Amino acid sequence: MRWTVEMLRVCWACLSLCVSLASAFSQSLDSDFTFTLAAGRRECFFQSMKKDASLEIEYQVLDGASLDVDFFLHSPSGHIITSEYRKSDGVHTVETDEGDYMFCFDNTFSAVSEKVIFFELILDNMGEEDESEDWKAYVQGTDLLDMKLEDIMDTINSVKSRLGKSLQIQTLLRAFEARDRNLQESNYERVNLWSCTNLALMVIVSAIQVYLLRSLFEDKRKIRT
């Protein structure tokens, strides 16, 4: 009977551990977004922050003429914390106060070209409760066959943090790849356009030269007759 109770406690602890891990993986404080900023427009986004937290914003212009945009970061009181003009990318980290932070992308200086912009938000020290500690209440006084759950949790948390870092790096690499691909496609189209234009001009000039030469020979024949 005692062994059955112990086994039930162990199963309940494992179930609680799995639920805690699932909730820990689902509560991500990192986010990324890609949008199209029309010509002559300004788009702003808001992020609620807590006191003594950290807000990191990284943005890149993936497509559009000159690959540049104006960037502004406003504090909850409305003051401009950071401003950049005609930049293709940037990274900014601020220690935050309680309130809503606003960051804007400005393309009003361009009247023709729209821009495709990618940005990523990384939030730290937001004060989320760590539900992964709930399993300790279910395993007190039980023998887990020399299994050290604390070591397992440390290893799982380490793997989780590394997976999160890998996801961030992969997201940035995808943004770099998209930007380079758009730039190469734009250069390819530009080279093709100028090549076709030069080819057409060469054909036209050659046709004009042939016509002029033929006309000169025809005039000489008429003069001799």
Image: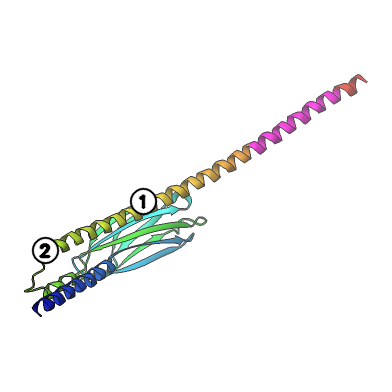
Residue under the point 71% across and 36% down: 204
Which residue is tagged 1?
173
- Give above or below for 36 relative to 132: above
Q: Quadrant of the C terminus?
A: top right
Region rendered in magenta:
199-219
The residue furthest left is 141
- Give above or below for 95 relative to 19: above
Nearest-to-viewer mark from 1 and 2: 2
> Residue 155, image x and y in percent?
17, 59
* Secondary structure state at the residue bearing disc 1: helix
- Left or right relative to 174: residue 162: left
> Residue 95, image x and y in percent?
21, 62
Front residue of 101 and 14 = 14
Residue under the point 86% across and 21% down: 220
Q: Residue 148: give its label.
A: 2
Residue under the point 11% across and 73% down: 139
Q: Quadrant of the N terminus?
A: bottom left
> Residue 202, image x and y in percent?
67, 34
Instruction: Characterize the magenta stretch by its predominant secondary structure.
Output: helix
Front residue of 41 and 204 = 204
Q: State how far apart marks 1 and 2 are (Cα).
A: 38 Å
Does 215 appear in magenta? yes
Residue 120 sits in which quadrant?
bottom left
- Left or right relative to 143: residue 110: right
Label 1 environment density (alpha carbons within 10 Å; few <14, some 14–19, many ≥20):
few
- Look at label 1 and name its amino acid: Leu
* Secondary structure state at the residue bearing disc 2: loop
- Look at label 2 and name its amino acid: Lys
